[in-house]
Image: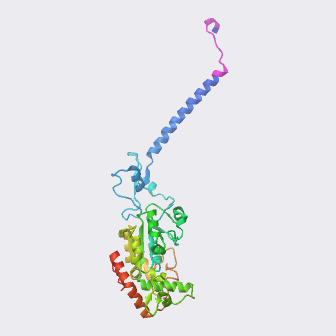
Amino acid sequence: MASRLGVRVVPTSPRGARRFVFIFSLSLSFTCLCYSLMFCGQAIMQKPLAFPEHRACYLLQSSQHCGHSARPGDPAAPNRTLSLSSPGTGVPPERQRASVTSPRPGSKRLPLAIIVGVKKGGTRAVLEFIRVHPEVRALGTEPHFFDRHYEKGLEWYRSLMPKTLDGQITMEKTPSYFVTREAPKRIFSMAKGTKLIVVVRNPVTRAISDYTQTLSKKPEIPTFEVLAFKNRTLDLIDASWSAIRIGIYALHLENWLQFFPLSQIHFVSGERLIIDPAGEMGKVQDFLGLKRIVTDKHFYFNKTKGFPCLKKPESSSTPRCLGKSKGRTHVQIDQDVIEQLKEFYRPYNIKFYQMVGHDFRWD
């Protein structure tokens, strides 16, 4: 039939068939890819993106979004977030909030605040009391990084810190920093905006407490009077003895003021901390930029220890008091020795009051 019509039938070659199958498969794959991209793209555009505000502000660099700095510890809105979503997507607000507040693992950060002193002033109490605040995470042990382990580097120091979420403040306390000459410069090099807390106490009482602690560990040491005087007959105080030297607060503060303004240093009264712990901790929270959450309701006075304790949390059967070494009965010292120490410290105390703008009434 074909020959009658004059049409010549050319048989299909195997190569042509393979080419046809290849082109058809390629077209089908391309079509599937296009449809996939269209549907996935639509889903992505409808999903809101949530950033912590301070990161979003950093990315946007826009004053309309960044009218307020979202620094950790900001009392006004420590956990503010900025939701970026396409207008008209129809995503309910509750879904957007759920995406913002969903739990995520924390990060180890360098401390924003450090309790730098002083030994036997009440630093452990301040640390334990401020740790009650939900926006504070603090290292429980003393790392001694800026006085003993500085050569290990900041990453080693960071690795010691507890994990914190955005808006939480990382803290640590090492009382010996206050009397370490290199500490101010080293902390300034880490972060010049670091907030410093110094718990101070009547230097005479502090010295006796210091000696009492040492005596409990080394019963063989000489008496307080022997260590406190270079010459007992001439009433020459030995200011090189650490128990005495730590209490010369004005001397040590001069070193810190070379690197940090007074506005970045908060002084806690060790005496007021015992009488009015909520009041002193309220000032600490203000200094850190935190809402006053640690209040009177958190404390009760332990008459046995002569010190305030934290009331028991709901998850605990016992209240939280400081260790046995806190509130220890002091060694009895002759009154004439105490009077001579008062005379020794008086000019240094007056200078300290003038430097910080506050009279602690130790005289």
Residue 8 lies, with reference to residue 96, above or below; the image says above
Compared with 46, 157 (above or below) is below
Q: Is residue 337 magenta?
A: no
Residue 292 in view, yes or no? no
Q: Residue at x 61, y 6 (%)?
A: 6
Q: Is residue 249 above or below residue 188?
A: below
From this viewpoint, is residue 35 visible? yes
- Span shown in magenta: 3-16
Q: Residue at x 45, y 58 (%)?
A: 101
Horizontally, is 249 left or right of 147 in the view?
left
Quadrant location, the C terminus: bottom left
Q: Residue at x 36, y 83 (%)?
A: 347
Image quadrant where residue 5 sits = top right
In-front residue for pair 161/219? 219
Q: Position of residue 80 (x, y in %)?
A: 40, 58
Residue 194: quadrant of the picture: bottom left
Q: Position of residue 71 (x, y in %)?
A: 40, 61
In front here: 106 or 11? 106
Measured as percent of width and height from the top left, residue 233 is found at 45, 93
Q: Is residue 106 left or right of residue 18?
A: left
x, y percentage for residue 315? 51, 73
Residue 246 higher or lower than 106, as above or below: below
Q: Does the magenta segment cover residue 10? A: yes
* Viewer-nearest residue: 290 or 23: 290
